[in-house]
Structures are given as C-alpha cells and as structure tokens.
Amino acid sequence: MKHVIIIIKKQLKDTLKNKTVLIQFILFPVLTLIMEHAINMDGMPELFFSKLFSVMYIGMAPLTATASIISEEKEKNTLRVLTMANVRPWQYLLGVGIYVWVICMAGAGVIATGFEGEEIIYYMLIMAVGFIISIVAGACVGIYSKNQMTATSVVMPVMMVFAFAPMLAMFNDKIEKVARFIFTQQLRTLLDKMTFDSIKTDTLIILVVNALLMTVLFFAAFKRKGLE
C-alpha cells in the first residue's frame, strides 16, 4: 500500500505540471456551473446541463486522463524506473486508477451542489460507477499504446462514442437502440430519473457486462504489452 500512496502523490505533482490532463478534471465541473446559471429556457428539464455534462464528464475525463498518464510514462521510460524501485505493475495501475477516480469524484462533487438531499447520494454513486468503468477503459488504451501520440489517436474515437452517443440518442431513436448497450447511455437514463427505484435489472446487466468487457480488454492488453 505504501507504493500505491507514493504513486498517487507522484501523479498529483505531475498533473499540476501537465495542463492537458489538468484541464480534463476542471473543464466539465466549471462549464456545468456556468451553463446552469447562465441559461434558463422555458420547458427545459431541471438540472438539464448538470445531467448532460455529467455523462460527457464520465465518457471523457477519466478515459483520456488515464490513457494520457500511462502512455506518457511509458514513452518517457518512467515506468521502467518505477519497476526498478520495486513498484509492481498492479501497484502502479491501482495508484493511477485511485488518483484519477478521486479527482473525478471531486469534480462530480462540485456538480452535485446543484442537487438536493438523497439526490446527491444517488448522483455520486452513479458517477462513481461510471468513473471506474471509464478508468479501466483508459488503462486499456494507455497500456496498448506505445506513446502519447498513439494513445491520442486511439482514445479519440472511443471517447466520442462514450461521451456523445448518449447525447445523440436524445434526438435519434435509431442511435438510442444501439447506444443503450453502452454504459454511459444507461447512466444517462439513470441520471434522468434520479431515483433508486429506476434502477432496473436490464440496466444492471448492461453495466456489469460493460465493466466485465473493459476488464477483459484490460488484462488482454496487459498480457500482450505489459508496462514496457
């Protein structure tokens, strides 16, 4: 656990220097607050922008941040140094995952200020699950990629699907029929309803399948590429 904590501290220092990663954590919470307070149209659902941007936050920030962190350190051979310092791969990946998750949850906490009572707990639980799945997906990309340029080219289409498919599904029934199998679309539906009673069996099955799929891809990428 000592090594995991060291990795978390290291990532915190690195993020303060890496503006590309830092902006991922700040952009959506700030943009959400601005949009919620600046735009108010007749017929607009309550907390429309908070729910919309929350799904985009899940599909973009943890995914791109995790992929960027891992691919950058592979490119700079930082991981080789950590390995020589007796830091095991699982300790490094766990440290990065916990770090990204905590920072993203802090951002979600900012967005949650617009909710009330039990809605805050419900919202944070939904975000927590989404962040975990997205982080594992980002780790897959980071491990598979040789460098940051490769990671960026791979992560972009994945990010577009996770972040924008739920938004497009709001306006197109055909897209919705396909998008319903993506975890971010299921999370968007849960955020729209904002009650624990809205969590159905098929929703849980889709979320579990998505999580298992990302986990399988993660281990496949790690077995093939490792952290070299």
Image (tube, helix red, strand yellow):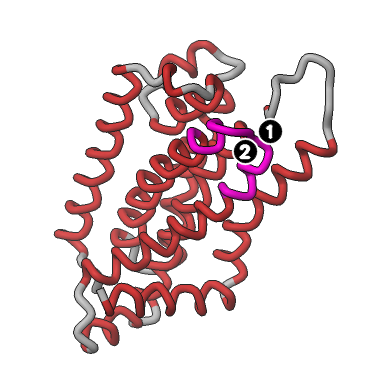
Task: Examine the image and state in which quarter residue 54 appears.
Answer: top right
* Residue occupying the point 81% across, 38% down: 37
Q: Report helix, strand or loop for mark 2.
A: helix
Q: CA distance from mark 1 to mark 2?
A: 6 Å
Q: Is the residue marked by circle 1 packed among few (<14), some (14-19), or many (20+) residues within 10 Å?
A: many
**Residue 154 picture location, percent across and down:** 41, 51
Task: Locate the C terminus and report the quarter of the image it occupies.
Answer: bottom left
Q: Main secondary structure of the magenta part?
A: helix
Residue with the most extreme left position: 223
Q: Amino acid type of disc 1?
A: Phe
Foreground pick, 80 / 119: 119
Q: Is residue 96 left or right of residue 118?
A: left
| Range shown magenta | 108-122
Q: Report helix, strand or loop for mark 1.
A: helix
Q: Is residue 54 left or right of residue 204?
A: right
Tell me if residue 116 is in the magenta stretch.
Answer: yes
Residue with the most extreme top position: 173
Do the numbered discs 1 and 2 sit on residues whose CB atoms are within 8 Å?
yes
Tell me if residue 131 is in the magenta stretch.
Answer: no
Task: Locate the N terminus and report the quarter of the image it occupies.
Answer: bottom left
* Residue occupying the point 37% across, 47% down: 132
Give the numbered dot on residue 53.
Answer: 2
**Residue 139 picture location, percent across and down:** 33, 57
Task: Examine the image and state in which quarter residue 11 appears.
Answer: bottom left
Q: Is residue 74 left or right of residue 13?
A: left
Q: Which residue is mark 1?
A: 49
